[in-house]
Image (tube, grey):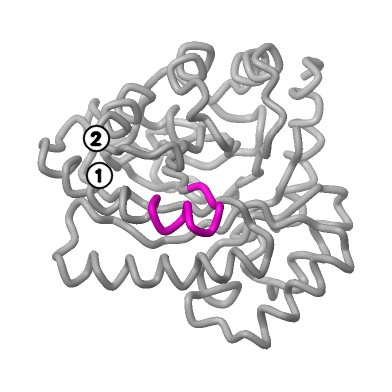
């Protein structure tokens, strides 16, 4: 497995500093969040040239662009067309930076509240994204995420049945799936099968105290619940079974570290990288 930092963890730093810090920590790559001030569809060619040169200098891969394009399910036709144009611009960015995958958001509501038309509209635009991505030899990633159309592995398969493209893959995120209260171990990996193309890791914990540092609320099938982000191994999302099945299945692609606790990004990444390396070899 190859390990990347999510640049959003280091959003207090410039993207250049984030790349250098990621390299210093010993990770193999950085997944760049497409948010100012790290990257955007409007980032200039000159800036992209600088990032490409820095990536090569550091020998730090950029496997994924974590775009915030999409949210097609509830977008107007005008909004959907505009975000699709942003996606096409970001394909050119991915070409230059050497990224082979781009994340696209489905939008909401929660899968258990969604109607068939939410899936149909999202599938239409995802298929258009996939057609464009194929021309650039890229994959389009949909993240399993709470409060979205794709909260579970079954939701992912439901959407996939509506999209006729091998260019669509999924990001497994046990932290998000813990929030959604769904399986994030063996069965989820088995169901996603060859369509599991990327993995995010972060830990979360349910709490009754919304005053805890970093606390946030999400709607789940249980109602509105409160959660706090945790470092790997300190929350409620047990990543052990996930990594056991990843090892057994021969998964050798990217794993991105995405911890959002209140402490500094460097400390979060340092802790989670040590923990995830043990998980990868079954020693955690």
Q: Which range is magenta?
A: 130-139
- Which quadrant, please, contains the C terminus? top right
Q: Is residue 82 above or below residue 72?
A: below
Q: Tell me if 98 is positioned left or right of 74 in this view.
A: right
Relative to 260, is 91 above or below?
below
Percent x, y of residue 36:
52, 76
Q: Which residue is mark 1?
A: 123
Compared with 185, 259 (above or below) is below
Percent x, y of residue 222 = 24, 26
Residue 259 relative to residue 85: left or right? right
Q: Position of residue 17 (x, y in %)?
A: 77, 71
The dominant secondary structure in magenta is helix
Identify residue for label 2.
162
Query: Are the residues flagged by discs 2 and 1 in contact, CB closer than 8 Å?
Result: yes
Q: Position of residue 93 (x, y in %)?
A: 57, 70
Q: Is 201 situated left or right of 279 in this image?
A: left
- State yes or no: residue 155 in magenta: no
Front in this rendered view, residue 63 or 283: 63
Residue at coordinates 38% horizontally, 33% vertically from top-left?
208
Classify residue 274 by image quadrant: top right
Question: Which image quarter: residue 96?
Answer: bottom right
Please tell me whether residue 80 is drawn above or below residue 203 in the rendered image.
Answer: below
Callout 2: SS: loop
């Amino acid at each position: 497995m190859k390990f990347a930092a999510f640049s959003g963890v280091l959003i207090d730093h410039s993207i250049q500093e984030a790349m250098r810090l990621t390299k210093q920590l010993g990770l193999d790559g950085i997944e760049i969040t497409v948010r100012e001030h790290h990257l955007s569809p409007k980032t200039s060619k000159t800036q992209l040239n600088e990032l490409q040169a820095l990536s090569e200098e550091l020998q730090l891969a950029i496997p994924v662009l974590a775009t915030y394009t999409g949210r097609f399910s509830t977008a107007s036709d005008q909004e959907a067309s505009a975000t699709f144009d942003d996606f096409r611009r970001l394909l050119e960015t991915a070409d230059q930076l050497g990224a082979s995958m781009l994340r696209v958001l489905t939008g909401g509501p929660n899968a258990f509240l969604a109607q068939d038309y939410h899936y149909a509209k999202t599938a239409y635009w995802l298929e258009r994204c996939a057609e464009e991505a194929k021309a650039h030899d890229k994959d389009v990633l949909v993240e399993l995420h709470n409060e979205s159309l794709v909260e579970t592995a079954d939701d992912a398969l439901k959407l996939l049945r509506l999209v006729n493209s091998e260019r669509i893959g999924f990001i497994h995120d046990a932290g998000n799936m813990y929030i959604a209260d769904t399986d994030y171990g063996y069965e989820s990996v088995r169901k996603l099968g060859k369509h599991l193309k990327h993995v995010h890791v972060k830990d979360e914990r349910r709490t009754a105290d919304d005053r805890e540092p970093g606390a946030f609320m999400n709607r789940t099938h249980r109602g509105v619940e409160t959660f706090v982000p945790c470092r790997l191994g300190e929350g409620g999302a047990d990543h052990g079974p996930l990594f056991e099945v990843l090892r057994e299945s021969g998964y050798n692609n990217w794993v991105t570290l995405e911890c959002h606790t209140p402490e500094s990004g460097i400390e979060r990444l340092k802790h989670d990288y040590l923990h995830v390396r043990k998980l990868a070899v079954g020693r955690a």
